[in-house]
Amino acid sequence: MHIGDGQIPLEQAVIYWIVALFFIWLSLRWARKEMDEAKVPIFAALAAGIFAIQAMNIPIPWGTSGHMLGSVLAAIILGSPFAGILILALVLIVQGCLFGDGGISVMGANILDMGVIASFTGYYTFRMIKGSLGMGKASFIGGWVGIVMGAEAVAIELAIAGTFPLIPAMTWMGIYHAVIGVIGEGLITAIVVTSVMKTRPDLVATSSKVGVPA
Amino acid sequence: MHGISLTDIERETYKNTPIHRLDGRIKLLFLIAIIIYIVSLPKFSTFALWKLAGLEMYLILLILIARLNLFYVALRYVMLTPFGLGIAILQPFFPQAFIKEFTIHELPLIGMPWTEEGLLFGALLFAKFTVAVTTVILFSSTSPMTEMVESARRLKLPREFALLLTMMIRYLFVFWGILNRLRRAQTSRCFDIWNKSVPRKWILEQIGYSISSLFIRSYEQGERTFQSMLSRGYDYTADIFVHKKRIQAPEIAFIVVTILVVGNIHFLG
Amino acid sequence: MSIIDVRNLVYSYHSVKTLALDRVNLQIEKGERLTLLGANGSGKSTLIKHLNGILLPQKGEVLVKGEPISKKNLKDVRRTVGIVYQNPDDQVFLPTVRLDVAFGPTNLGLRPDVVEQRVETALNNVGLNGIEERAPHHLSGGEKKLVAIAGVLAMEPEVMVLDEPTAGLDPEGKQRILRLIYNLNKKLGITLVIATHDVDVVPVFSDRVAVLSHGKKIADATPTEIFSDPDLLRESHLHLPIVTRLLQGLQEDGIPVKTRFTVAGARKELLRVMQEQCMGYLLQT
Amino acid sequence: MSIIDVRNLVYSYHSVKTLALDRVNLQIEKGERLTLLGANGSGKSTLIKHLNGILLPQKGEVLVKGEPISKKNLKDVRRTVGIVYQNPDDQVFLPTVRLDVAFGPTNLGLRPDVVEQRVETALNNVGLNGIEERAPHHLSGGEKKLVAIAGVLAMEPEVMVLDEPTAGLDPEGKQRILRLIYNLNKKLGITLVIATHDVDVVPVFSDRVAVLSHGKKIADATPTEIFSDPDLLRESHLHLPIVTRLLQGLQEDGIPVKTRFTVAGARKELLRVMQEQCMGYLLQT
């Protein structure tokens, strides 16, 4: 769901960049407060780890394989959407500059969709239902909501850009990601969260801490 | 990842050509300038199509000077095409909000209507995408990632973010290795995500557990690295050390030539 | 027929000019204990990866039970040849020991009760019963190694290949692993191939030693023969075992000791020589 | 005054019931070569992390140059005491050799040209010039270890602590590292502390050996003294060095050899005994 260069006009791309930079700044501020100096090595390593995780093939229907995005996963485990934003921003910068996955001018938009919107919607959905459904199910739904919302944001941005009419874009992006998101993001997020809780319960911030992170 | 791995890209960056030797800051600015130029071209103009074609020729010339493996360049381009082509190819079949009048034709055989204007818009989208991707391929294959971050740091990328990015680059390769060893060990024990003789649910669980193990390993890597950083005097003021190089004649020549070429393409093309 | 037959194997990595494997021939016989001895970078790991088709030969071929490894028989080959990699963290990735050991047999499509049975047996064989529900993540390095071995054992391979099995272990951990794999060979009849650079470990262990250096097999003989040739080991960037070094020092001093490589062997040899030497002394006077 | 003085140090990890360090006392003298010998899990790494304030004492104290380590003097302490961790991937965390070695001196706030100078000197001292632009993942294990050492050297520490410096290296790699750190001690006068479980490496190397077992220091003496006491090493889950094992075997056979732990020492001792023994034989007849 990476947007490429040229698909969004420059002036709009600049706005997305500004919004994205603002959220990166917020997430750095959050990290500084939560993890102080340890954040640099931990987030650098986690970003590298998520990069590798995104390369793991997951069998999705129709005999093709997809991969995980990971922003909601990071947000849930580290207990804040800002964790997902910071990690995805790092990953997207490397993907854009190195692989050409997602453009340069539209990198702000990509960070906004896959980092900010996916993390926020996914994480807060998870937070709302965690109490009643438990960690596993809440992670599943959180992961799924994050990816679907991220995809819808792409549809809306492309529509604003005039690249695609709004309704078909939202319908098709929505349906496609709603289907693949069940496995690629929802199910895997749930398995990973429960398994990390088993192995390193101390890492899973959300399971112990209540209270909204700044 | 997409048939092209980190190591393939890295191998190209180790070549020694005039393009590779250029100062990283110049290449970074070049990347940004070209992308901005492409994106700011009008979204509906036959003229722009020719300008993009001219620019693409110039980029291909630079790729040749940089002696990049052409098979590798083509492969990278082809791997990325679906992303751009998908959106472009649908354009003739949708009305664009910013276009008032359409010239409508029908597809032979199936009779589906399409518009000339949509076709031009789609072609432009795809052309912009192509030139942008070519620029990124050229840039990423001629400057090592470390150099990119060092250059960005010299161009005032904040200290903390530069450190994050450089360390991430180091650990990209570490985790790339771990991922490959993990896969190899799984393959050795007959794991196959398309194995029909085990339940699909079980396979997905195993993938989830692998991802969980990678996640924990990266977190713990960060924890251990933090201790070793502290041992070397790390605190919140830490910065990366930038090995200073000066802008010299080749850089200036490159800038002048690029401005001349792009200027020519823009005003004459 | 050799259980594994490596013929004229050539392999080079894309990024490197020199050959990682240069016309290697190696026959591995059923039931033997073979050591692949070589410095880091000598080609041991590349060779190992060819033994179960993780890498396919660029030139030459690898036959397992008489059949050349090809894309078609990979599953059978991997059922026959199990590999235990150097770093257990790359191999043991599931949240409990039971799940991890069950990974291989489940992939073979076995019924859950058979898998269960295999897990029990495998953990029994490595002496790790009762920790089925523990998270491998929190085990010691030595225990993790044992879980990795159990994970391969549960697939009931005929050949087990271990890459640097003693790496990172302390003396007691090393002993435990070596005793274990020795018993796997003796009691279960599993053919063993160990890749290592640890010259002091090999001798106690193997029937035969193949020495790799810069991608070439430069020797293939009994440990005694290998360690009688200091030049050979020097060429391959290895050392003589400590015991052998001591005995060769004494040889230089004019004491007629023969080359040995284990503590027990050297002890016997020194005793023998001392008695004889003194006898000689006696006769001269 | 000892350069490092560990007094009654107690530490426990909060997930584990047993003490990781149990009233440890240890004086490290300027210029010496000390080995911390212990099995995996004996508390070596926990002790090391106290030597430069990565961990602060739960009870007891650690003095560096007479000053107790506290939050205030951490930066000075870390300038005095450099630590080289076991796994170079934890230590070499920047993507080129130059960036990595420059990290420490940059943190000390030195001017860029001084940093550049220190990087040069440090790489010189470990014998790795000309690889400034290389990426760590293209280096061999041994080279990465050398880069890690250079990274610490560039801070010009007075004490250098190395955790399992020979882990994972082949014989030649081990030799190279050991020779290097021996020279750092001899030529630059750097005090050396090496934590290891490798009994065959220590003897050649150290002035003094402190043995750790289950978080306690159970011995602190010269290598000769340590290796004359097989029970001590058994208690700490270690072995005697191979050479010592051989000599003690001969002692059991009634040969009056003294305990030695290096190949050279044993060679001399065996020669001496052979001559004497034979003389004895002679006199009896």
Image (cartoon, coloured by chain):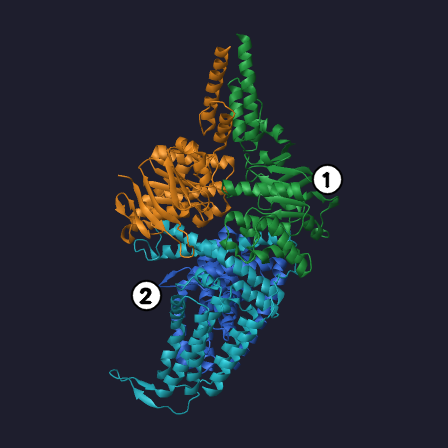
Chain colours: A blue, B cyan, C orange, D green
| Residue C196 disc label | none
Residue toward you, C1 or B23: B23
Element assignment for label 2: loop
Amino acid type for the residue under numbered disc 2 = Trp
Query: Which residue is tagged 2?
Result: A62
Q: Residue furthest left?
A: B109
Amino acid type for the residue under numbered disc 1 = Ser
If the image is split into quadrants, where does the N terminus of chain D sit? top right
Q: Quadrant of residue C27?
A: top left
| Residue D2 disc label | 1
Residue drawn at (47%, 25%) of the image = C266
Can you give x and y, in whole percent of width and height, for residue B140 in the image?
A: 48, 67
Residue toward you, B209 or C236: C236
Residue toward you, B169 or C39: C39
User: Is A166 above or below relative to D91?
Assistant: below
Can you give x and y, in whole percent of width and height, for residue C95 in the image?
A: 45, 50
Can you give x and y, in whole percent of width and height, for residue B1 in the image?
A: 42, 62
Residue toward you, D254 or A157: D254
Chain letter of the residue beneath label 2 in the structure image: A
